[in-house]
Image: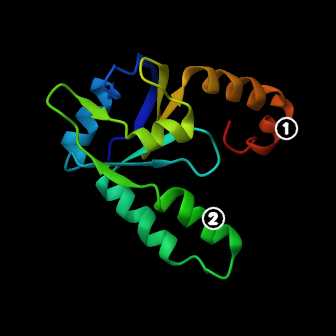
Amino acid sequence: MALFSGKYYFTVDPKGRIIIPAPFRDIMRSHYDGKVFISNAPMDKCLHIYPKAEWEALLEKSKSLSLTMQSARWFQRRVIGSGIEIELDKQGRVLIPSSHREDTGINLNSDIVIVGLINKIEVWERNEWNKAMERDSADTDAHAKELSAFI
């Protein structure tokens, strides 16, 4: 199975559409059925785009969460509740719904960053991405220690 990886810079068009990078489109069409879902990310101020099969796997996992846990209810409201199917047009674009743009600070004509993360794609407003990268890289020693088995 092909995996999403790479980082791309684009701009939201005046109609609220973004271009899905060609390598990601190729993966969606060749390894999935081309159908995609968009949702709010659980922890960050960005969006996640999932191929349909990956979205369905996430739905199955979320069914096992105990709704007596406040965090489970929060996750289902934030992520599952915001998930909707979107269409990839012939030019390789998707329309980012206005509610999703509002939740993440992505405006019409915003500069964005699109990042492949194995089984999903993240979409960030460029300034939010830069802030997150600065914040996350502030403690590289702690990250290195936690990830020492992987790097």
Q: Is residue 110 above or below residue 50?
A: above
Return the residue nearer the eye: 140 or 112: 112
Q: SS for tag 2?
A: helix
Choose top left, top right, bottom left or bottom right for residue 142.
Answer: top right
Q: How many labels does the image show?
A: 2
- Counting other residues with Cα less than 10 Å from the Cα at mark 2, is it few (<14), some (14-19), or many (20 or more)? some
Q: In this view, does 71 lie to the left or right of 29?
A: right
Q: Nearer the viewer, residue 74 or 148?
A: 74
Give 112 or 122, whichever is nearer the viewer: 112
Q: Label 2, on which residue?
A: 74
Q: Residue 84 carries which label?
A: none
User: Residue placed at 76% from the left, 41% from the top?
Assistant: 148
- Which corner quadrant holds the C terminus? top right
Q: Earlier in the sequence, mark 2 or mark 1?
A: 2
Tell me where residue 17 appears, x and y as whole percent.
32, 28
Residue 69, image x, y percentages: 69, 77
| Residue at the spot 55% in from the left edge and 41% down from the top edge | 103
Please, what is the three-letter code of the amino acid marked with disc 1? Ala
Q: Which residue is drawn at 37% across and 36% down?
A: 96
Give how far apart the Cα atoms at labels 2 and 1 are. 28 Å
Tell me if residue 95 comes above or below residue 149 in the rendering. above
Instruction: Find out whether the residues at labels 2 and 1 contact each other: C-beta distance under 8 Å.
Output: no
Q: Residue at x 31, y 35 (%)?
A: 95
Residue 25: x and y in percent read 26, 33
Quadrant location of residue 87?
top left
Vertical placement of 49 versus 42: above or below?
above
Type of colouring: rainbow
Q: What element carries label 1?
A: helix
Q: Mark 1 points at which residue?
A: 142
Mark 2 or mark 1, which is nearer to you?
A: 2
